[in-house]
Amino acid sequence: MLYWLLYLKLFHYFPPFRIFRYLTFRTAFASLTALFTGLIVGPIVIQRLRDFQIGQYIREEGPQAHQKKAGTPTMGGLLIAIAILVPTLLWADLSNPFVWIAVFATLAFAAIGFADDYLKVVNRRNLGLTARAKLGYQTAASIVIAIALIVLQHRGEYSTVLLVPFFKQVHPDLVIQRLAHHPQLWPLAFLPFVVFVVLVIVFSSNAVNLTDGLDGLAIGCTVIAAGALAVLTYLSGHATFATYLELQRMPQIGELTIFCGAMVGSSIGFLWYNAHPAEVFMGDVGSLALGGAIGTVAVMIKQELLLPFIGGIFVIEGLSVILQVGSYKLRKKRIFKMAPIHHHFELLGWSESKVIVRFWIASLVFALFALTTLKLR
């Protein structure tokens, strides 16, 4: 909105407004706008949540130290969504389709999380949507995103070819080309791509959701992951850097840097109130939205296979639950004292703050490794 007004409309009357065409400038201001939106609106949202008695319910089988957190305002993810979307709409070029796909992903997964949180509050228990319903809605949203990207691929603005870390010459295409030219078989040609997109986004969304179990843990890791995505997005949209690093250059992708910058700013703003001891929890409305946004951006900038490193802690948290459930169903034995894995370390005797900070450090190491792979390819 501001980009359209200050640069496209007023630049000719006031030449200094040319600064608003620079992506780095608008990304910085989007981050700051998101940060101050979170800091200023945060107390208002927290008070409203208290007024409506929207408190967190703690499962009894978890660490007993967490029982004192019962009643802490939840659904603070509404603050995160606002702080991401408002700066994006203000500072991004709204004629860019990738920006709108990112906005849709955030809103769609936030809506799913909101429904889940609302049912928990209404039913006064730590159970909201059923697992089947939640996965169904997440899958539907991811399919819509995949279809939008297929449309952009037909317009030559997106590629379904994967970038494989460490291998320069390996570029598998997720579209079956021999079927793509047959009108009747055309939908089957894109089926592998759609399935892949759904798996990436749904896993990303749920992995962040599972990580959100300690004060500031998920949002701190999100700051790091979103920062890494901002760098990767900027490089992918920059002609010189993309060519040098042998990335698939998609000029319009660069505008997503503003969205990633807003995600960093909003996460830092929320961390101000979510740091231990937390004044508010993000709830599923925040964790699902952040995970969905991270997965969607990774798909759009063609860094899906690098996502396990960008969000390394999220992946470990998600895999710990899968392994725990699988082991118990197959062997009737548990691998960890409790899953997700951050609870395992709590039960080993680590304090909550120690688990959080050490997981942040691990997340930073993963993100830095992800960035180094660009030159190691």
Image: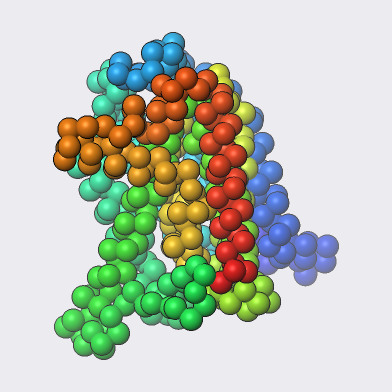
- The residue depicted at 72 percent of the width and 64 percent of the height is 22
- The residue depicted at 42 percent of the width and 44 percent of the height is 316
- The residue depicted at 41 percent of the width and 21 percent of the height is 347
Quarter of the image for residue 259 reads bottom right
For residue 30, side relative to residue 106 (left or right): right
Q: Would you place residue 81 above or below residue 47 in this image?
A: below
Q: Would you place residue 293 above or below residue 196 in this image?
A: above
Q: Quadrant of the N terminus?
A: bottom right
Quarter of the image for residue 283 reads top left
Of residues 356 and 55, the one drawn nearer to the viewer in this rendering? 356
Q: Quadrant of the C terminus?
A: bottom right
* Residue 34 on image: x %, y %: 62, 42
Of residues 241 and 186, the one drawn nearer to the viewer in this rendering? 241
For residue 153, side relative to residue 79 (left or right): left
For residue 190, side relative to residue 246 (left or right): left
* Residue 209 on image: x %, y %: 39, 38
Q: Would you place residue 183 above or below residue 333 in this image?
A: below
Q: Is residue 266 visible?
A: no
* Residue 83 on image: x %, y %: 56, 40
* Residue 195 on image: x %, y %: 28, 63
